[in-house]
Image: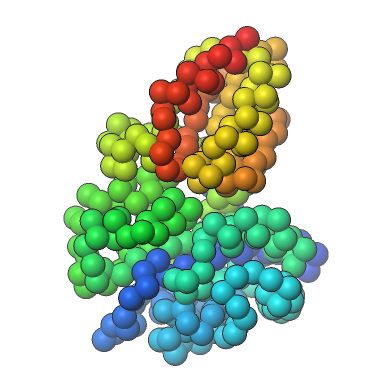
Amino acid sequence: MSVNDAPTAIPTQDAPMSVSIWFDMQPDAVNESTVPLWARELAQAHVDNDVHLLAHPDSVYAKMGLVCEIAKESLWPDDAWSARLTAALKLAKQKNMKQLVLLLPHRCAPVLWGQWSLLYLERCGGYLDNLTGLFQGIETWEHALHRPDSNRWLMVDRVMTYGTGLTKHDFVQQMRAFNPMARWVHEGFLDKGVLLQPINAYHTNVPIARIPLKNEDLRAWGTNKVVYFATLSEMNQAKVFDLLDRWREKYSQKMVRLWAVVRIKDVSVPLSVTSIHHLWASHMATNFPVHDFPENRFWILGEGLDAAQLQAEFEQCVA
């Protein structure tokens, strides 16, 4: 069973609770004549005490006037947000809810919130499960891609598309252009179980569950934004860690997200590596024997990446 197939569990009072952070990805999203399905589903989950909704007043969801707890804190995470999230998570656990969903407006930066959550959310009683981006079909995909802030799409783990301007065909054809690593949902969830299913996007073993990218995924953004490569050699552990340190110093601004599985010589389990800009983590995936992973695999999302150079630098670490 992959990390993404883990069953949904009701947290105990002491266990950290799953937190999903939703971002409005457009500055000009508008209220539609009818409430979108995803918003109705979130509101019902809140009423049913399955999910606790915490929404900034400038978020698209809050502007619809639907049920939630309104949080008037700033647009960036700080001590006030820590206090608010601590109280909200405590309340959610007392009601045996399964997840807290935080809805934020376009002016909030997914990179900043993602890094802060990984560093501090556990102190509030939660853990980051995923970052979700909301895209309304009021503009073409091409226009959205060429916004100055289009790289924020590389940060999200799930994209929710909605609006009368979108068709299923548009969605399927263009989804890779935003983020080939993200999950995609159109209009709403199939049922409550899908809504509540954990993504575990920041689980330490996430690279183990990734599948290789196809050529069309790489062409969507261009190889300078999406890099995927695989090699068969066993690698020298000291050289690999030295390389990762150098990449962190040299490429942290360019590399928005990185996932990797590396075969280390004379080690029976693979090395799992994840990063968000300057935040890097690695560990030996003790539950997964190396014979299940005959390849070294790297998935990198970013800006101005040289795929050939990155692969060549990695191949210099061969044992």
Q: Is residue 290 visible?
A: no
Q: Is residue 114 above or below residue 72?
A: above
The image shows residue 159, relative to residue 165, as above or below, that is above
Q: Residue at x 42, y 79 (%)?
A: 60
Answer above or below: position of 189 versus 287: below
Q: Position of residue 162 (x, y in %)?
A: 30, 69
Residue shown at 67%/40% (left/top)? 281
Which residue in the rendered view is the most extreme toward the top? 319
Which residue occupies 43% across, 35% down? Answer: 305
Kindly indicate the quadrant of the structure image that contains residue 139.
Answer: bottom left
Q: Residue furthest bottom?
A: 65
Return the residue nearer the eye: 4 or 233: 233
Q: What residue is at 66 percent from the left and 18 percent from the top?
A: 239
Marks counted in the figure total 0
Q: Position of residue 207 (x, y in %)?
A: 55, 37
Q: Colour scheme of this structure image? A: rainbow
Residue 170 lies in what quarter of the image? bottom left
Q: Would residue 263 be visible to someone looking at this image?
A: yes
Relative depth, front residue between 186 and 165: 165
Left or right of 292 on screen, residue 286? right
Give the residue furthest to the right. Answer: 14
**Rendered location of residue 25, percent (x, y):** 40, 66
Quadrant into which the C terminus falls: top right
Q: Is residue 296 left or right of residue 40?
A: right
Q: Position of residue 4 (x, y in %)?
A: 54, 47
Quarter holding the N terminus is top right
| Left or right: 146 as drawn, with respect to 43 | left
| Image quarter of residue 217 | top left
